[in-house]
Image (cartoon, rainbow, N blue to C red):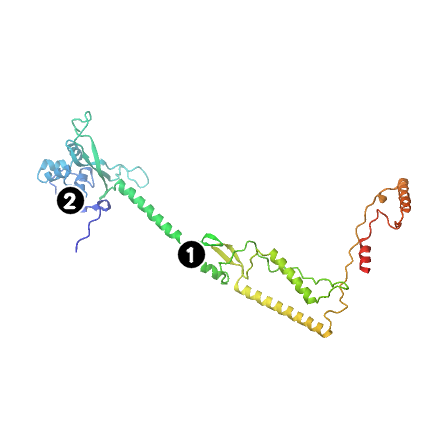
Amino acid sequence: MTAPPPPPLDETISRRQDVVQWWLSDDKNGIPPPPYTWMEERFIHRYFSETPFFDWSTKNGLIFTHAQTNIPAYELVHNRKELEATLKKSPGVEYVISHGSQLVPKGPGVVEGQQSHVWVLRKQERLNEQPPGLSTPTTPYPLTETRGSYYIVNESVYQAPSVADVVGNRLLSAVVALEKMFDKAATLPSFAPTTGHTYLPSTKERKTARREHGGVHASLTNPLPLREPRARNHPIPPLRLPRRPPAGASAHSPEDLLATRLLADSLRQTSVYSDDYTDENPLLGEPGNLKFSFSTAAIKKRRAEDEAAEKKASEARDKVMLLRAASGSPKPAAEKVKVPTPPPPPAVFTEARAVTGKEGRERREERKRRRKSRPGVDSATSPTTPRSATGGLVSELAG
């Protein structure tokens, strides 16, 4: 069984407490000279060389290897300024400290002179080809290219990720979030010919809402009402029996006349309310959040009341039919339909009433003379006085 591969270096944290304890001890024979403090500047290069991030093929690695058997090289390793000055004199890959530990700004809980103990090391390649005019005696190879960056925070060492890794990680997070969003949104839309595209809640929420509002199941495939349905407490206009036909006309039974009237009223209601949709338990709300108007108990109570009213009306009709059958006449003669007498029309404002005095009397006398001179004109009626509507209607009925 093969061992699993080691994790990438940019996902690794290195910490060497044994090396720190060696540095703080006094068994170094005075090289470098004491005192020895925790994570000081002379110790950073040596501490970094004991981590897996260190490349022993670099110029730093060659110097550290030579320091194992050479005292001047050993002293050079523990002197940061002299070591980095030596690295500048030759081309190749090297490690240098780009940012050292800084003082912590003053604030609550901060001791004066406290250091941050954060070090930044950069792995760079010092180029051999140098443009003229940039080289100096101390730095003959000034041009460099960065190969990596590392952080030392207290005793922990980290490798900084590359720009490609950071951008790739952010893009991967965005793609994963979008995939989750699309998977969640794919279960929400619902399409029906009557409602179109809607977004419904989860099945659990729909079941809970159905239990809270009566539990009466209704088909959602029925068309939704275009207008509010007629309330049940709005009575339909009562039916009126037609008047009895005049003498000499063909007589029809009251049942035939009632059936004709019911047919006409049914056609009228069909033309008026043909677009309305009514249900025993109408739905309220909008698609995705529909609720029933009444509970199961209310619907059962309403059904019982309707059945009782229908039974009572049926018994009354049966009683009337029995009475009519016993009398031997479909309708008693005393129950004649009376012709209602319309109210008299309002008084007509005539010119004769408006004219007063001597001039008015002269005009009236002149009109009387004119009527007498015309043959066939009844003197009892005046052209300015309208005929009574009541009298005309009564005379027609009498004829």
- Circle 1 residues within 10 Å: few <14, some 14–19, many ≥20: few
Residue 179 shows in this picture = yes
- The residue at the far left in this view is 69
Amino acid type of the residue tagged 2 in the rendering = Trp
In the rendered image, residue 307, in percent from the top left (x then y), is placed at: 59, 68
Vertical arrangement, residue 217 with respect to residue 96, above or below: below
* Residue 272, picture quadrant: bottom right
Viewer-side residue, 95 vs 308: 308
In the rendered image, residue 73, in percent from the top left (x then y), is placed at: 11, 36
In the rendered image, residue 344, in percent from the top left (x then y), is placed at: 80, 53
In the rendered image, residue 132, in percent from the top left (x then y), is placed at: 18, 25
Secondary structure state at the residue bearing disc 2: helix
- 307 relative position to 213: left or right: right
- Where is mark 1, residue-wise? 202
- Where is mark 2, residue-wise? 22
* Residue 260, picture quadrant: bottom right
